[in-house]
Amino acid sequence: MIDPENQDTSLIHRQTKTKPSRNISHYLIGRPLPTADAPNETIGKAVGLAVFASDALSSTAYATQEILVILAAAGTLAFGYVFPISIVIVGLLAIVVISYEQIIHAYPSGGGAYIVAYDNFGHFPALVAAAALLTDYILTVSVSVSSGVAQIISAYPELFNYRVAISVSCVIFIMVVNLRGVRESGTAFAIPSYLFIVMMFITIGTGLFRLFTGSLSDVPDPPDIEHFGEALSGVTAFLLLHAFSSGTAALTGVEAISNGITAFKEPRSRNAGITLIWMAFILGLLFMGISFLTREIRAVPSETETVISQLARTIFNGQGILYLLVIITTTVILILAANTAFAGFPRLSAMLAQDGFMPRQLTYRGSRLVYSYGIISLAAMASLLIIVFQASVTRLIPLYAIGVFLSFTLAQAGMAKRWWRAGKLAPQDSDIDNRHQARDELRYEKSWFIKMLSNGFGALCTAIVMLVFAVTKFRDGAWFVLLLTPILIGIFLRIHGHYAKVATSLSLEHYGEPPPYNVRHRVLVPISNVHQGTLAALRYARMLSDDITAINISMEPGDTERVRKKWEKWGRGTRLVIVDSPYRLFLEPLLGYIDEIIASRQANETITIVVPQFVPSKKVHNVLHMQTAEMLRRELLSTPGVVITEVPYQIP
Amino acid sequence: MIDPENQDTSLIHRQTKTKPSRNISHYLIGRPLPTADAPNETIGKAVGLAVFASDALSSTAYATQEILVILAAAGTLAFGYVFPISIVIVGLLAIVVISYEQIIHAYPSGGGAYIVAYDNFGHFPALVAAAALLTDYILTVSVSVSSGVAQIISAYPELFNYRVAISVSCVIFIMVVNLRGVRESGTAFAIPSYLFIVMMFITIGTGLFRLFTGSLSDVPDPPDIEHFGEALSGVTAFLLLHAFSSGTAALTGVEAISNGITAFKEPRSRNAGITLIWMAFILGLLFMGISFLTREIRAVPSETETVISQLARTIFNGQGILYLLVIITTTVILILAANTAFAGFPRLSAMLAQDGFMPRQLTYRGSRLVYSYGIISLAAMASLLIIVFQASVTRLIPLYAIGVFLSFTLAQAGMAKRWWRAGKLAPQDSDIDNRHQARDELRYEKSWFIKMLSNGFGALCTAIVMLVFAVTKFRDGAWFVLLLTPILIGIFLRIHGHYAKVATSLSLEHYGEPPPYNVRHRVLVPISNVHQGTLAALRYARMLSDDITAINISMEPGDTERVRKKWEKWGRGTRLVIVDSPYRLFLEPLLGYIDEIIASRQANETITIVVPQFVPSKKVHNVLHMQTAEMLRRELLSTPGVVITEVPYQIP
């Protein structure tokens, strides 16, 4: 036996020659990529814009309409407020984008609101932000795919009965493309995203040109105005606030880039920051343009025709090819908004898993270097929501957007706190003793006060929007999100508790001197019969120790004599204990016997159970045999102080 | 080490003190019974009649009607043939019963047609009989429960949408009562069975009395005659044969006692035989009485009112309490006919399992000394049929009865062969060298020729009935049974082949001298990290051998250095192989390395893989950990020459 005190360690470092074998999934998601390829699997600004902006840009397809719907309660005259409200929303967008621009440079490892809150407020607010964001990502997928499919169905009503199947298929399609890697999904989805942007600019440009040349008319044959269930009232401050809140749907998706900075090519922060600015400009221009023209052509909110459709129809004089292109690209961008969530959710959950708040498997990068488990989980949960809510946008949308504004608020409040901390430092000092694994370095900042004010103001605005959401949409389903968030946080904390306990219990920190090697080794061999498999197990047991006991649980009285006779011939003198089991139980008497042995165990004694394990060549043959070895193993694994050895006996 | 040639064996025989712990199933199926109670768990003649006759007796509820339905094709005048045909059927019943009486005494271990065919024709015809009988038992449950429920639904049509659920609930109820043991199910179901017999005798007695006193009228307001889709024709020989075949439905269930002899108290054969005679008498009397009165009162076949209902209504002058009792007991006996199948199926499949044609688990007697797996399998398959056929009797009934007549034919032909064999013996000789495990002893029989003729004639009759069934009902679904039977036989043979292969490969028959003990022992310890669990596995490995190699598959480049450092401190000089896995595969590189080791293995060398197995105290926590140990185990179990040892590390 080697001297236990010998501390010389021989180390062999080698590389496996094993390459992943070809299988069906490679055709679906592409050939596996080595880990060293990770830097190549990042995206530039142009593709990044397509990946991360589709969620935000798609909201221009409905944000203006959401404002009109609320204003309709005060009659058609109130529609005039749509443009001023939109300008205020774009102002809020500017504030939020400036905050996130700062976040991207302050926290270049990504993680957005979660990391900002973790670093500045501690883990609990961070988990609130994470829970809100994860919920929102799932909802983004369900809502955007359902609304895109709803557009298809208004064109082809005969597909109505298949809406759930179509929606789930879309989710699975986007999932598969994402499993191929971020670069591939970005490239694949860039074309429709840019097509949408181009089409919207053409629409708005043509609209403005015709407006100034005086050839733009009102909407011909406008759809009936619907009041969406609210009684007609005057234009009150509350109504305007409500309309403003609804319009802020345009801001959803702005946070995505800050969560996914690691997807960008180096220099990451710079690329991500520039992409964010581009996105904000495009978003702001499109939104203002649409809202302005909507007012000019007197478009009305309706459930039968969207505002975008009224706009395109009026500007392009009827339903020609340009009109059709606008409608098609809008539909596609609505479905593709889901892709942004597929870029954000897996990264955020991997970060949570890294910190021990979600299952560790989520940090595992699949064969294409993306977080496969996260992508699949997101697709599964979004599909579940689609199935439960039968792909109904009306029933899904109230659940949406609260989470984003909660994360906006926490992120901006966190940044405000950070500027305040920066302001307290001496000009030459820096503070790297922050709470979240030293991911950034805090330096004194001259203009800390004005930055703190701007972030604080942004936080206040988004907090108000969130509260208005929570109050006005509570009964429509916002209660569900308000209930789900604490449940999620509870789950995060329990998972964290478990990992912490495991780490403590496995830790070598205060382990001290390892216990001495055991000298006595007792071996038990449960046998159901005497055959070649049993003898193989017995032979192995002999190699381990001289102290062997075979145990046979006799369920049918007739078997005892048969086993005894065979044992006399083949047992080679090994002690055999036959335990009669009058109630034909197998496991319980065996465990009872083992417990007795354990109870009489000496301090330096190890007990090994050698189980003869029968392995048929075809898995299907397992149904023809009692799975006693498997049952035994499962029971004994949780018995401390016992080691289980399986001696397999392969049947050809 | 103990001398391998030492043949002294120490044997300890003890009885477990472990009693089955109380659990929820005991409330459902009763407290467990010790094996020694088996003789008490048998039934006498009175209960036996209730258990095994309910199937046969219930057929009197529809056999007469089945004859009328066919005769209707030749017009109402043809209905006069119902009584002569019934007499012929009762004659056939007598022949079949005499055969089975002989079978019961010749083969007292039960098994009916299967054993008779096995003993006289070999295993293939035996499997044909078994497949036919098993199929028929399953169909008996589906058909009888569905038809009982159909009766309930004709009284309460609002239950129509729940018919499948009600039927399946009935099956589950009968299953649970049967799991309580044969004695309990017999007692529970004896009362309704005897009530039915009593009510039918009262009905027939009253009918005959009123007939001879001249007060019996024709059926008042008879339902419309239906021709069941066949064109009106004359009374042809084929029509009479067809009507005769349909009426032989009365014979189904006669074979049940011969399969379940072991359920009877000692002297088994005598008790079973007497019960069979009783059953045949009651069945014959009821059937003839019903057919006779049916003709006298001019009852007609109809889908809206059964013949039994017309009979009871006419005899009891309208729908009073006696009428109601007849209808209720008929409904109950139809459902209880399923109980006979629950007594037969598990015993027959246990017998097949004993002979290695079905999974061995079917021989396992549960806590109440009945073949639990067989009972549950029967309930599951019958429920499946009910669900697939939506509890429709019309769609299920064509599948029914072919199997029984196939088994009748084989059983009687087998007996004829047996008498022929007996006739060939010298008067003082006896032949115990039969094919099926010497279950009976063949003696010379003086009247062998007449017995052979009677059994041969019976076989011929039942064969004709079977052929008529197969031809006339082929398109209605009999093809399904004709297809299923060979498939079942194929499955039986494949299972048998597997068990035979296993037995050969495990056999010690020609094992000769066992191979010598191995001396070299190589131990591999795959580790994912260095922690207390790993060190425990390492400590155990040290006890097995000096030749230990730890293997770490490094999936993320950053981990390598961390593992190396820890190993230097805690590895105690053990060799560590770090294998870089650039494609983040875990299993494949490890298996590749192990394959290399195996390839260079010496003849007398054993390789043990010691796997540190992480065991969280709560099962649910398993989702928080990669199940690498489990995956590894599954892969390695099928690698010959490798033993897997799991060193569990319990997390509190």
Image (spheres, coloured by chain):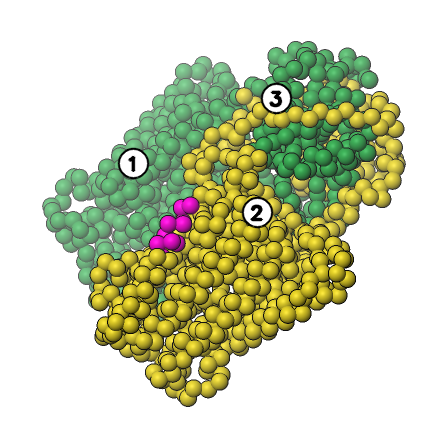
Chain colours: A green, B yellow
- Can you tell which of label 1 and label 2 is closer to the viewer? 2
Q: Could you give the CA–CA distance between mark 1 and mark 3, rounded to whole angstroms? A: 60 Å
Q: Which residues are magenta?
A: B187-196
Image mark for residue B629:
none
- Can you tell which of label 1 and label 3 is closer to the viewer? 3
Q: Nearer the viewer, residue A84 or A432?
A: A432
Looking at the rendered structure, whether the residues under marks 1 and 3 are on a common chain is answered as yes
The quadrant where residue A553 appears? top right
Q: What's the amino acid at mark 2?
A: Pro
Q: Secondary structure at mark 2?
A: loop
Q: What's the amino acid at mark 3?
A: Asp
Residue A546 in sight from this viewpoint:
yes
Q: Determine if the magenta segment contains residue B190.
A: yes
For disc 2, the chain is B
Residue labelled with disc 1: A466
- Can you tell which of label 2 and label 3 is closer to the viewer? 2
Vertical arrangement, residue B78 with respect to residue A85, above or below: below
Image mark for residue A595:
3
Looking at the rendered image, the quarter that the N terminus of chain A falls into is top right
Relative to B142, A609 lies left or right: right
Q: What's the amino acid at mark 1?
A: Met
Judged by its main secondary structure, the magenta piece is helix
Contact between marks 1 and 2 (CB within 8 A): the answer is no
Which residue is depicted at the point 74% across and 54% down? B432
Q: Secondary structure at mark 1?
A: helix
Residue labelled with disc 2: B267
**Dot 2 alpha-carbon crowd within 10 angstroms: few under 14, some 14 to 19, many 20 or more:** few
